[in-house]
Amino acid sequence: MAHNPIEDLLLQAYPNPERVDCPGPEALRGMAEHIVPVDDPLAVHVWHCSPCFAEFKIFRDRKRARDRRIVRVKLCAGAVALCAGVVLTTFLPGTSKVGELDFSRQASERSVSTVADHPRKLRAAAEALLLVLPTGSDTGDYELEIRSGSDIAKAIKAVQGRASKDADGRIKLRCDLGRPFLHSGPYIAAWRFKGTQSWHYGTFIAN
């Protein structure tokens, strides 16, 4: 703590061995805990009574130390929260940027021309995809391709994932897409059970 010559002076300049008009420790503690106007009678006395100022200084320094500890704890907690957020978004991208496409009510189409006219929507910033497969789909390993909406033969992204049944009985296929790569526009999701030849399709729009 920085040396304060004014406080050193106050500790010696006003001796009051008889402790005349001294308010007592509780009042001095209260003054240390709360802001007191300089013209308050209690403040006036403390600034002109070295023994009272010495007691007041002890209470004040304790409060300052306590306040510093609280600030450090809050800063540490904030730093931990920030680091956790960075870890989640950097190393576990799927937990914070998962896009979902629900094709559970769609027939398991094997031709793009028969896919519903109202495509689903997906955030272009999605780093992982949760595909709810049509009712009756199998659980297990799948291949997934994101294809151009204007050219079905053009695969923009090819990934693999595993489909499992959730608590509601829906078959969900999860695939990590990596860093965002989609631009706004129409796309085709093409998936097939690993080891088979038949593709199934669903259209979506990235926005």
Image (cartoon, rainbow, N blue to C red):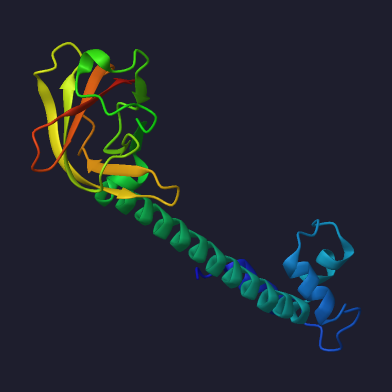
Q: In the visual, does 179 lie left or right of 75?
A: left
Count of numbered tags: 0
Side of 195 relative to 42 (left or right): left
Residue 51: image quadrant is: bottom right
The residue lying furthest to the front in this view is 136
Classify the position of the C terminus by image quarter.
top left
Residue 137 rendering spot, x and y as whole percentages: 28, 40
Q: Compared with residue 71, is residue 86 higher up or lower down, i.e. above or below?
A: above
Between 203 and 10, which is closer to the camera in this rendering?
203
Of 184 and 104, nearer the camera is: 104
Q: Residue at position x 76%, y 59% from top?
A: 35
What is the quadrant of residue 76 in the picture?
A: bottom left
The percent coordinates of residue 56 (x first, y second) are 73, 75
Residue 48, visible in the rendered structure: no
Looking at the image, can residue 84 be seen?
yes
Rendered residue at 8%/33% (across/down): 197
Q: Nearer the viewer, residue 184 or 100?
A: 100
Place of residue 46 in the rendered image (x, y in percent of width and height, measured from the top left): 79, 71
- Quarter location, residue 134: top left
Please indicate whether residue 109 sits to the left or right of residue 120 in the image. left
- Say above or below: 161 vs 70: above
Q: Which residue is located at x 52 percent, y 70 percent?
A: 3
Is 59 above or below relative to 80?
Answer: below
Which of the pair 167/188 is nearer the observer?
A: 167
Please give left or right for residue 110 compared with residue 61 in the image: left
In the orientation shown, which residue stands out farthest toward the right? 21
Q: List the single residue furthest toward the bottom.
A: 18
